[in-house]
Each structure stands twice: as structure tokens, then as C-alpha cells.
Image (cartoon, rainbow, N blue to C red):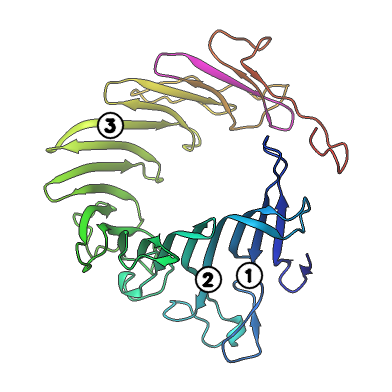
Amino acid sequence: FTWEVDTHGYAQVNVLWPQMGDGVRRLEQHYFKQKVYLPGTTTQIDHLAGREWKTVACLPASASPSANCASELTRSETDWAHTVNDMPVNGSDLPAEQRPRFVYAQQSRSYRETLPMVRSDYGYEKERQNGSQLGNLTYQQERLGSGGGWSATPLRTTYTQYYPNLTTWVINKPAWSHFYDGCYGCAGGAIKRATRNYYDGATSPDVIVPDKGRLTRQEQGLDSLWQDTRFSYAPNGNLLKVERMDGGAVRSSSETFYDPRFRAYPVCTKNILGHTSQQRYYGVPGSTDAGCTTTAGSNLPATGGFFGQLEQAIDENGQGTALQYDGLGRIWLVIRPGDSAANPTVRFSYTAYSGANAPFW
């Protein structure tokens, strides 16, 4: 197939798979968008270029990557579109081909042996994003295949509301979502589940614009049955604790402790019963918190490994699994309880590239 210079990619790529033990080879055909014309013009844009719009798996007419399909097995298709409407930064002073565009999937379809199976429709309504087009998925609806087409009645629909903050650009945090059997307003349609998200200590998920975008509470359920989960954070944004509530009381929790120097590596996790699991990383100090004190990671070994790579994971029973790496930082040995470096549980070996016909073995 021809490499498209202007869009730096192929319009079609075929993959011929080896036999799967049944004497049959299978062919995959991947189709990609190239440059497209702006409606009513001779100007091309590359905003859609490289997006895969169709994939076909089939039995090939011959054992060649360039063969045609003799019998289709599965097929998936995606409709792509683009727009400059309602974007907070729309480049209206630029030529049309240079303006920033929101590229999105409108619909995807899957087929099995040419019969339609599932169709998904996607919506990005500005009304559910405070009046701006920010690319958030606000609507997804699925339909099953019916005969040679699609069912007139949707199978399920999810609606999601956002309250983006265009000052701090916290724009992709869903406030709530409703999951419907069928759809809202459809005959027989009924809500089956809802999710309410609270950010930055807010007391309501509605019309509260997040500041930092840290999820501090989430409720999932329906009617009088809700699961209430609370989240707390360190000043740097690290997640410290997750608590699942029932009737205002904590029923289960998970607390995470980080290294004291970088405050970036989770070195201990403790549940509500006090059971802990620990991690050691090369070159990283252990936790000094009274809630969970851990041992520092080793200095980098001469055999290989890089700073921050996982050295050991210790489970709730105090049993540790050690990891060793080669000079390129690739995992070399996995040593579980009862084994040793001389007789590891798993040993990996890597063979140097030896030619185009045997790149890895």
C-alpha cells in the first residue's frame, strides 16, 4: 500500500496472522483517515488524519498480506467528525485550515459475519458543559442489531453533566451521570443507576465549579440506596485515604503512606483493620509516619536497575516478592517467598537484535 506523504501515514495496513493451530491464516485490514476537504472548498485539512475508521478480520483469498477478504469474520467502523463551533479557543482570526478543531467520534458499529451486533452513538452537548465545547462525552447510547439494521429502541443510555472551570482549566470532571435502561423519555425507559461527584470539599455536585478538581466524595446508587465514598488528599495532591461510609460511619478504608523525601512513591497501604502492604523502591527512603513505618529501598545494585524501580513488594502476611533488573533497567529476576536469586521464581533473558528476519530471538 502507498505511503501518503502529505499525511505521513498509510490509508490501509494489512496484517496476515500465522496459523492458529487450525491450518487457517487470518487477515486483518486496518483503514485510516487521510486529509479531508473542508465542505464546499478545495482546501484540505489533516485534523482527521491517522484516525482508524474501519477494521476487518477475515479469511483471506490467498496467504498474502495484500490479498482480498474471501469471508468476513468481524468488522468495526467509526464515523469521525470535526468542528470549530462553541470552542473556548476557536482561532476565528486564522484561515479555516489552520483553526483548532474538536475531532470526535460520532458513532461506532460492530459486525459479526456481516450481521450488525452493537451500535454506539456519542454526544458532546455544550449544554452539559456550561455552554462550551470542551470535548467531554456527555451522551452515549447503545443499540443492538436487528436483522440487517439496528433496533429502533436503544438498549441503554448514559448521560453525564460537567461544570468546567475555564479559569484554572479543570474541564473534564463529571459532576453526575445517569445510566438508563433504554433512554430518558423513551417508552419503558427507566433510570437504573446514578453517580454524584463532589470536588474540592463541595457539599453538592450541582453547579459547583471545581477549583483543583480533586474528587472528595462520590455517591453511587439510586433512590434510597447509595454507596458513599470519601477521599482525602495531601497538600501536594497525593491521595491519602479512601473511606466507604454507611449511615455516617466508616465501614472500610484504605490509607496510603508516601516516602518522606520525594512524597511521590506509595510505600505503604493500610486498611481499616491495620493490615499493611509495603513497597520498597531503589534509592527511595521508607515511610517515617507513625501510622506505617517502612524500610528504605537499597542503593542501586551493580547488576542493574534504575532509581525508583520497584525493589520489593511485601503483602499483608509479611511475605515479600523481590525484583532485580539488568543494566538497561529491564526486569531480570522475580524472587517469591521460598526462592532465591540463585534459583528465582522467574528469570527473563533478552537476546540482542540479530537481523531483520530475527529481531528478538
Q: Quadrant of the C terminus?
A: top right
- Determine which of the numbered discs, if any, sits on residue 33 in the image: 1
Of marks 1 and 3, which one's residue comes earlier in the chain?
1
Callout 2, which amino acid?
Trp
Q: Quadrant of the N terminus?
A: bottom right
Question: Badge 2: few (under 14), some or many (20 or more) residues near its Cα, within 10 Å?
Answer: some
Callout 3, which amino acid?
Ser
Magenta span contains residue 323? yes
Range shown magenta: 315-331
In which image quadrant can residue 349 be found?
Answer: top right
- Tell which of 102 and 80 is nearer to you: 80
**Marks 1, 3: nearer the viewer:** 1
- In the rendered image, residue 156, in percent from the top left (x then y), is placed at 31, 58
Q: Residue furthest top?
A: 338
Name the residue at 44% across, 81% down.
85
Question: Badge 1: few (under 14), some or many (20 or more) residues near its Cα, within 10 Å?
Answer: many
- In the rendered image, residue 249, in percent from the top left (x then y), is placed at 15, 34
Of marks 2 and 1, which one's residue comes earlier in the chain?
1
- Badge 2 vs badge 1, beta-carbon distance below 8 Å: yes
Callout 1, which amino acid?
Lys
- Tell which of 114 and 159 is nearer to you: 114
User: Is disc 3 placed on a helix, strand or loop?
Assistant: strand
User: Is disc 1 placed on a helix, strand or loop?
Assistant: loop
Name the residue at 41% across, 45% down.
236
The answer to whether residue 233 is left or right of residue 75 is left
Kindly identify which residue carries mark 2. Answer: 80
Kindly identify which residue carries mark 3. Answer: 253
